[in-house]
Image (cartoon, rainbow, N blue to C red):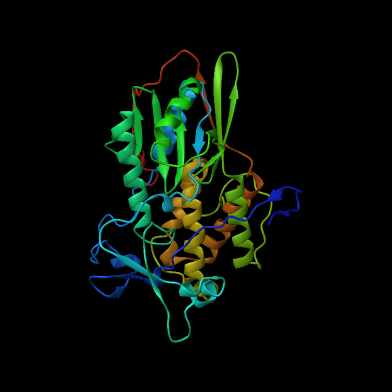
Amino acid sequence: TDSNSASDQSVKPKGRFCARGDLVYCTNTNKIMYGKNAAADGSIAPDLWAPCTSLVGFRTVVAHAANRGRVPKSLDLPSAFTQIAWSGKDHFIEIPPIARSFFEDERYIGSALKRPMHRLLRCLYGHPVSGYRFTSVFLKHMTEVGDFETCSWCNAVMYSKKFDCCISIYVDDVCISIDADKEEALLDLIKERFKCDSLFDCRKFLGTRIDTIDTDDYFYVRMGMSEYIEEISTMYAQLFPDLPLKNKLYPGSQEFRPSTTESIHDAKNEKYRTGHYRQKIQILLGMCLWLTRSCRPDCIGIVCMLCSQVHIWSADCMEALRSLISFLWTTRQKSLFWRIEKGVDMFCFQFFDSDLKAPKSQGC
């Protein structure tokens, strides 16, 4: 059922057929299927997890669209995994008693002593192999019927000269750059194999909000993660309620300097080096790393320094983390801004890799 949120917007819960990983069995091993050993033949699979797009792959699609003055599009495939028929060795699932209690057919209800097993006919969400099979089938179909080619540096990114189209896939989310007059032709090709809806403007992908502005001379793309920053700030407030956030106009603490030794052993530092605190700090820094890679490069320096201090965390590090997240919260509406001049094609004229921690004598 739909419900009204605080912002008076209709919210529709999303339901899927899901398989619990601890209730999937493989016929040739008679063992429970877990992520670490859930290959189709029961062995460990090096390609168990589906090839999904990278941050570079996603930005490639956005840049391709922006260079042509387009708004990136999204494609929704309803129950995408269940559109893929199961193939290979038979896998069986055991339906939990709570789920069986909702069934009306006695064949699926079972009893306390009789817990029926069901053979998979379709890929299910939650099964560790489903993502790989969906992506493989989608890529194969587009290669065969649409003259698409996968990129050598990211298998989940495809390009077609015929359609001048670039596609990026993340699990079952698809981001597309294509001209408006070719959308229907592309959808017809996809509908030959998949059930899907019409294309719509891609406003969020990989947790990044995408906004576009079209002017006479330039096409602008703005990518921000204000919602993700709010999530980071909320988690910080829950983990460290005794160190509240405050308004900050610069990242990190100006007095903070990374240490290379554990020379400080007073009580105020020791408590931050316990496993309890270290796990919390690692979670927060991991989220900050993804944020800085995606759209906040202005904070990458302090984040890298804090990551190097996890094993020798101190009260000074804690204050620097507090300042960093306070700064992110204060500037959460800031975005990565691209400006593309119309009529000028993009090309790479120079590339360099800088090491923020290297001595100045070494240069970049």
Q: Residue at x 40, y 30 (%)?
A: 166
Number of numbered markers: 0
The residue closer to the viewer here, 199 or 349, is 199
- Residue 279 in percent (x, y) is at 47, 68
Image x and y of residue 86, in percent:
33, 56
Image location (x, y in percent) of residue 246: 68, 54
Name which quarter of the figure residue 193 lies in.
top left
The quarter of the picture where the C terminus appears is: top left
Asked whether the viewer can see residue 326, the reply is yes
Report x, y in % for residue 264: 46, 70
Side of 205 relative to 29 (left or right): right
- Horizontal placement of 157 versus 106: left or right? left
Residue at the limit of the structure toward the bottom, as seen here: 113
Residue occupying the point 59% across, 61% down: 235
The front one of 76 and 56 is: 76
Q: Is residue 220 left or right of residue 64?
A: right
Residue ID at (34%, 27%): 160
- Residue 205 vertical placement versus 214 (above, below): below
Q: Quadrant of the N terminus?
A: bottom right
265 left or right, relative to 227: left
Q: Residue at x 54, y 36 (%)?
A: 202
Residue 54 picture quarter? top left
Can I make out residue 359 in this image? no
Seen in the picture, residue 290 relative to 218 is either above or below; the reply is below
Foreground pick, 227 / 307? 227
Residue 95 against residue 345 in the figure, above or below: below
